[in-house]
Amino acid sequence: MTILTATGSAGMGSMLVTLVLMLAVFYFMLIRPENKRKKEAEQMRSAVKTGDKITTIGGIVGTVVNVKENNLVIETGADQVRIEIAKWAMSTNETAAEAAKAEAKKAQEAKAKAKAAKKAEKGK
């Protein structure tokens, strides 16, 4: 009788450990990245300014003409059609993405120059 009780409690312990491990995997693989994406999207939407080129979740591409508290007025096409959309409907900000890409390229070039200078200094 004691053998069965010991085996049953050991089985419960391993099941509990497995459950905790599964919850940890779900947190780090699903929940945490999703919260990070939501935070980045909210920062992007709050940082939008007049003149930025954006794309909506519906695929409309335009330039921001006016920024309101919860809405954006964008101008699309050569005929200058103006559309008012909700901020949450903004998908991407191409102007900010291009600026971030250029900044990353400058940082990479500066790092390469510093590395080359260090290598040349070492060679002397």
Image: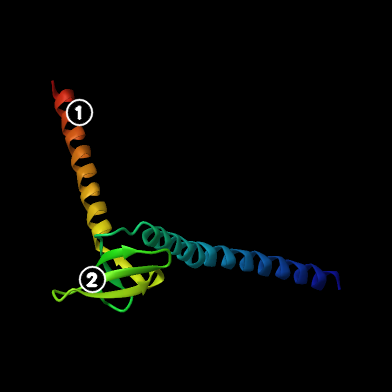
Which residue is under mark 2?
75
Q: Is residue 120 left or right of residue 89?
A: left
Which residue is under mark 1?
118
Horizontal and vertical percent for residue 92? Answer: 30, 66
Give SS at disc 2: strand
Disc nearest the viewer among 1 and 2: 2
Q: Quadrant of the N terminus?
A: bottom right
Task: Identify the residue at horizontal 31%, vertical 79% (top origin).
Answer: 58
Q: Is residue 49 left or right of residue 116?
A: right
Question: Residue 64 lies in what quarter of the image?
Answer: bottom left
Give SS at disc 1: helix
In front of the other: 74 or 122: 74
Residues at marks 1 and 2, CA–CA distance in whole angstroms: 49 Å
Question: Residue 66 lies in what quarter of the image?
Answer: bottom left
| Crowd rating for badge 1 (residues with CA inside 10 Å; few <14, some 14–19, many 20+) | few
- Dot label at residue 55: none
Horizontal and vertical percent for residue 118? Answer: 20, 28
In front of the other: 124 or 80: 80
In front of the other: 97 or 68: 68
Q: What amino acid is at disc 2?
A: Glu
Q: What amino acid is at disc 1?
A: Lys
Q: Are marks 1 and 2 in contact (CB under 8 Å)?
A: no
